[in-house]
Amino acid sequence: MSGGQTWLILGASSAIARALAREAAARGADIILAGRDDDDLRRTAADIGVAYGVHARTETFAALDHAGHRALAASLADIPGILNIALLFGIMPEQAAMDADPSLAAACLDANATGAISILHHIAPLLEARRAGMVVGFGSVAGDRGRLKNYVYGASKAALHTYLAGLRNRLGRSGVHVMTVKPGFVDTAMTFGLPGMFLVAQPRDVARVCLNAAAKKRDVIYVPWFWWGIMSVIRGIPERLFKRLSI
Amino acid sequence: MRKAALKLAGWGRTTYAACEAARPERFGEAVAGFAADAGQNGICLYGAGRSYGDCALNSGGTALITTRLDRILGFDAQTGIVQVEPGVDFRRLMEVFLPRGWLAPVTPGTGFATVGGAVAHDVHGKNHELDGSFGQHVTAFDLLLPDGARRTVVPADGDLFAATVGGAGLTGFITRIEFRMKRVPGGAVRVREHRAANLAAFLSAMRDAAGASYAVGWIDAAARGAALGRGILETAEPIEGVFAQPPERARRVPFEFPAFALNRFSVALFNEGYFRRVPPDGRTRVVPWRTFLYPLDALHDWNRIYGRRGFVQFQCVVPFETGARALRDLLEVISASHQASFLAVLKRMGAGRAGFLSFPMPGFTLALDFPRCAGLEALYARLSAITLDAGGRVYLAKDALLDAASFRRMYPEFPHFAAVRQAVDPERHIQSDMARRLRLQDAP
């Protein structure tokens, strides 16, 4: 759509990413699906093309391939209209698995934090120059507090939250809005079949909420919204007590 | 792709299966997940979970859930041919294509059902007499065989096509379906509702309406004596006009109703009200497609109305020649049992069917729910026996209680199906609780 919006979805294979791409396309935006599984992304691109009549294409993107980040950012320069970025990639190895194999912990940080910061840092100057658009970065409620059950993943998301806060400050000066999304439990491959899930949100609902909030230039949102309350309580527990809890 | 120990249920929530379930989101994961060794009880394919009984359950085995394989892969606006992944559901087809004037050629009574499931059960709709079964509109599908081979199957392929359509997912993993949508002039139908005072009047009204584009009867299965078989016949014709559907105002049944909520008195009261809602000389309304095709979809989780005990749906078809008598016998047994639930459905079917184990045959089809109760197995067996004696059959997508011997007699083409299954899956990689119960596993 000339002069319209284009969303670049980084990590486009996940359920939330697919839903976000569809929702943005339904609102008229062109879509670039970036990720590693190109065969699968082409299927999503076909779906979006048929269902919403917008232009949808794929790009190869890997969080750990920092050299590729420069090329991807460069390829975005001639996109007409407004360019928006949604960052959704991430891995969540089980805490026990990372405890047993610390290299997995490093891999989790590499993908979720280093990879995310690398690609956004390559794209940031472009957005500053365009003086428009937005960045929607997916963190996690797990990044709000280091919990026994999930603190390495949480640390990777905490790093991303801090980075996005700084980026928000920087890009805001150029009219580019940055929104941090902290999802609670969403019905995705990451949570499928996990014990202890409650009030699980559907990806499509999360996508709608995110795009509505981004349009209103919200800074940080929890989805579903009640996670703000849950995390406020969890953040409020004194460390002296929290360190003994297993939540 | 993670597997999780889950308890999956049929829609009737009387059949459950503890199994290892996986829900791939990427196509490659799904292919790998299907090919992986699944152990002694094998693997089954599970869609939206809208089949009532145990056809998509696999106790002690693996289940591959297809709902996240939900992409529309292509559409030709000249021919109306659409290609989809198996987890695309009928709601999405309507959402995407109705605004452009295209509708699924055949749809089951819920839009939550997947297209993969529609092929696996060769489903029919309220237009069966005119438009046939879903499988008759399928122009091709991709089938991943248990040995890892991928085949594109077209109707001219004969046995593999006919064994897969209506084959309850037992011949392979249907990974892509190509079928022809149908043109409609607008977003609504004009529905004509007629009251029928008893079974004879109902059957005669249905005969007179045989040329209607869509026809469905709601029958009061609790009525007795002179009112036996009374109900409301709805016929519908597509009309021109705006395609947009009204916004969905879905309600959710928030909890399982207590068992006492549903009893012979509340059912009789509801049915009486439903019957009298239509004036004696009928009425005509304009109804959006979604409301007409999927009347229960606005009430999410409606199966909870039956409470924790769950329910069983019995659906049979009996040939026209023996049908009037068989329907009378069935309704007498049902009304005498005092177990019938709310409205039952009565429709005419045509000859259209595309598979060896397809349900349809020319005749009358009757469908109704029974809350699970003592003696239900015996009641179901009586109804099955009347059906069998009339030369009819019960619908596998609904069934949880049929016995293997009756199944064989109802489905005379089973040996053709079994021969294909023996050829494509000699190791029985694909299994299900239904396949074990009805001995669909057996060699021909």
Image: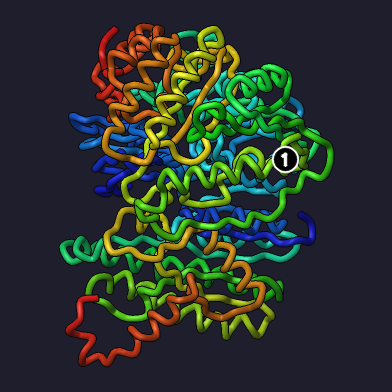
Q: Position of residue B122 (x, y in %)?
A: 50, 23
Q: Is residue B246 left or right of residue B18?
A: right
Q: How many marks?
A: 1
Query: Looking at this view, is B434 or B405 the one in front?
Result: B405
Above or below for A195 versus B181: below
Q: Position of residue B41 (x, y in %)?
A: 21, 30
The residue positioned 30% from the left and 40% from the top of the image is B373
The residue positioned 28% from the left and 41% from the top of the image is B16
Q: Position of residue B403 (x, y in %)?
A: 28, 20
Q: Is residue A52 left or right of residue B17?
A: right
Query: Looking at this view, is B30 or B58 the one in front?
Result: B58
Query: Looking at this view, is A217 or B234 the one in front?
Result: B234
Residue type at mark 1? Pro
Q: Quadrant of residue B254?
A: bottom left
Which part of the image, by quadrant, shows the C terminus of chain A? Answer: bottom left
Above or below for B246 versus B64: below
Residue that lies at the very extreme toward the right in this rendered image: B241
Q: Position of residue B74 (x, y in %)?
A: 63, 34
Above or below for B196 versus B112: above
Residue to which mark 1 is pinned: B279
Q: Quadrant of residue A186?
A: bottom left
Q: Secondary structure at mark 1?
A: loop
Q: Is residue B100 visible?
A: no
Coloring basis for residues:
rainbow
The residue positioned 54% from the left and 61% from the top of the image is A205
Which part of the image, by quadrant, shows the N terminus of chain A? Answer: bottom right
Output the chain of dot 1: B
Crowdedness near tag 1: few (<14), some (14–19) or many (≥20) residues, C-alpha within 10 Å: few
Q: Is residue B399 visible?
A: yes
Q: Quadrant of residue B64?
A: top left
Query: Looking at this view, is B337 or A120 the one in front?
Result: B337
